[in-house]
Amino acid sequence: MPRLDQLLARNLGQSRREVTRLLRRGAVAGPGGERLRDGRLAIATTQLPFEVEVSGVVLQLRLHVHLIQHKPVGVVTSRNDDRHPTAWGLLEGAPMHAELRAIGRLDLDAAGLLLWTTDTPQVHALTHPNRAVPRSYQVALARPWTPAPLGPTGSPELRLADGSRPRITELGPLLERDLHPALQPPPGTGALAQITLLDGAYHEVKRIFAALDSHVLLLVRVAHAGLWLPETLEAGAWRELTSLPGGGP
């Protein structure tokens, strides 16, 4: 079970020494108003989130935090970048901000659903190719694409220039009535498509449509692991999740 001082340090973004000072001077109160002074106090996971008051401010102590973000175009997924604003920077003020890690990535010129968590094993679980986690994209293209050949299962089968074979479970036209608000087709758009993959390789969607004689003008990730980007979540905004797809607490 996590200790009180560990939870306070992580949720406040402070050192254990700073937390010890807070506890010793009686700045931390429990749910019933009692002063908590022993940092070794074990907090059962069934008690989480554990509500405390720190220097008069109510704080929900969490073991992990999970977020969904609408990443805008022009923002990189990296935590730090010398040239571009970062998606992590847009999460400032989120719980446990310093520990948040992106689950996968989106390119500078891509937008859409980006998941974040403080639970490192969940990053691996939702990104590793062996897990075959679906990711869905809506795409604006410069021109219609050449249909891909179908394999024995009826799914498109395609070999890219580097020899890789993307695992495509869905590839088809996107009707305007199904267009996600996050995808605003730019001038010159000649076709709209929706594609679902079980991989997350570098520039994979762009390379797939290039192999099909088209060119991606804009792509938006609308779903990851069955979790859809809320239509009302504005670009740059985020929401906290109670759990991750697959059961991450």
Image: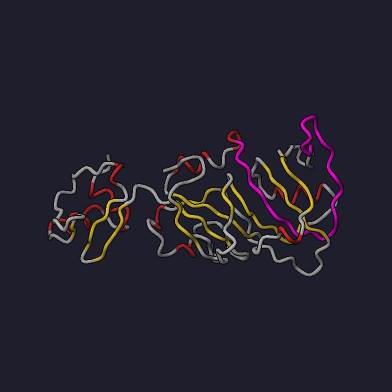
Q: Position of residue 7 (x, y in %)?
A: 28, 50
| Quarter the C terminus occupies | top left
For image coordinates 53% across by 58% down, the residue present is 69
For image coordinates 83% across by 54% down, the residue present is 214
Name above or below for residue 213 compared with residue 127. below
**Is residue 220 rendered to the left or right of residue 87?**
right
Q: Position of residue 162 (x, y in %)?
A: 76, 40
For image coordinates 58% across by 35% down, the residue present is 131
Q: Nearer the viewer, residue 96 or 171?
A: 171
Residue 13: name its quadrant: bottom left
Q: Position of residue 102 (x, y in %)?
A: 51, 51
Q: Which residues are magenta?
A: 132-157
Q: Position of residue 132 (x, y in %)?
A: 62, 36
**Is residue 197 rendered to the left or right of residue 52?**
right
**Is residue 187 rendered to the left or right of residue 249?**
right
Magenta-span inclusion, residue 135: yes
Q: Nearer the viewer, residue 125 or 245?
A: 245
Magenta segment main secondary structure: loop
Residue 52: name its quadrant: bottom left
Residue 234: name its quadrant: bottom right
